[in-house]
Amino acid sequence: MSGLIGRKIGMTSIFDENGKNIPCTVIEAGPCVVTQVRTKGVDGYEALQLGFDDKNEKHSTKAALGHFKKAGTVAKKKVVEFQDFATEQKLGDLIDVSIFEEGEFVDVQGVSKGKGFQGVVKRHGFGGVGQATHGQHNRLRAPGSVGASSYPSRVFKGMRMAGRMGGENVKVQNLRVLKVVAEKNLLVIKGCVPGHNNSYVIIQK
């Protein structure tokens, strides 16, 4: 599956030919350098390793610097492997946003915004007292009963309770590419993608 590493710039909206306002996300996609070519004979599988976003050498290990030096490039902050790449590439090749076309559909993967420790109403959509059939008296956002008493005398695993929310790998599929701005390495994609502004995302076609 062909793809690129990118950075989420932010959201905006554009008008289509019918005058409809479409919400969209702007992504800086690439250019990415091929930092390693994995082969079946050596690695047991075929894949391309791409690097994105230059990194200061003093913040890199010597092993990493040697790895990137083989590809003839500087150290990179983000490295991702893509299996079953559509075109054949060599070590050190540059892949840019031109691999995408306007109108095609892509999948975008990123780390969702971390929301910290949240209760059951925000985390799982519980109704609270307003929609409850059993009273909660004065505890409007409480989870209610979480288990029986004498048996099983414990709370089952997987019970929907309060806890850490967000900060997870999320993939949004079938988002349409509205515009490709090749000279600025920008992709304008319909809808929203996971992650905060300036976070790394992986775009796959």
Image: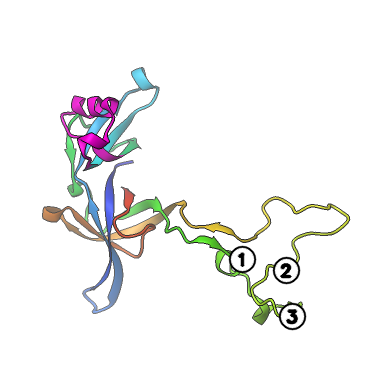
- The mark closer to the camera, 2 or 3, is 3
Which numbered disc, 2 or 3, marks the residue that appears first in the sequence?
3
Quick one: SS at disc 2? loop
Instruction: Decide: few, some or many residues near mark 3? Use Cα within 10 Å; few <14, some 14-19, many ≥20.
Output: few
Which of discs 3 and 1 lies nearer the camera? The answer is 3
Q: Is residue 32 left or right of residue 123?
A: left
Q: CA distance from mark 2 to mark 3?
A: 11 Å
Q: Which mark is residue 103?
A: none
Residue 137 marker: 3
Point out the tag, 3 or 1, that comes first from the N-terminus.
1
- What residue is at 40 percent from the left and 55 percent from the top? 173
Q: Which residue is outermost to the front?
A: 58
Q: Is residue 76 left or right of residue 151?
A: left
Residue 55 on the magenta span = yes
Question: 78 and 104: which one is in front?
Answer: 78
SS state under label 3: loop
> Label 3 is placed on what type of residue?
His
Would residue 106 appear left or right of 134 to someone viewing this image? Answer: left
Q: CA distance from mark 1 to mark 2?
A: 10 Å
Q: Position of residue 30 (x, y in %)?
A: 21, 47
On the image, numbered disc 1 is attached to which residue? Answer: 120
The residue sitting at 21% across, 32% down in the picture is 89
Q: Quadrant of residue 57?
A: top left
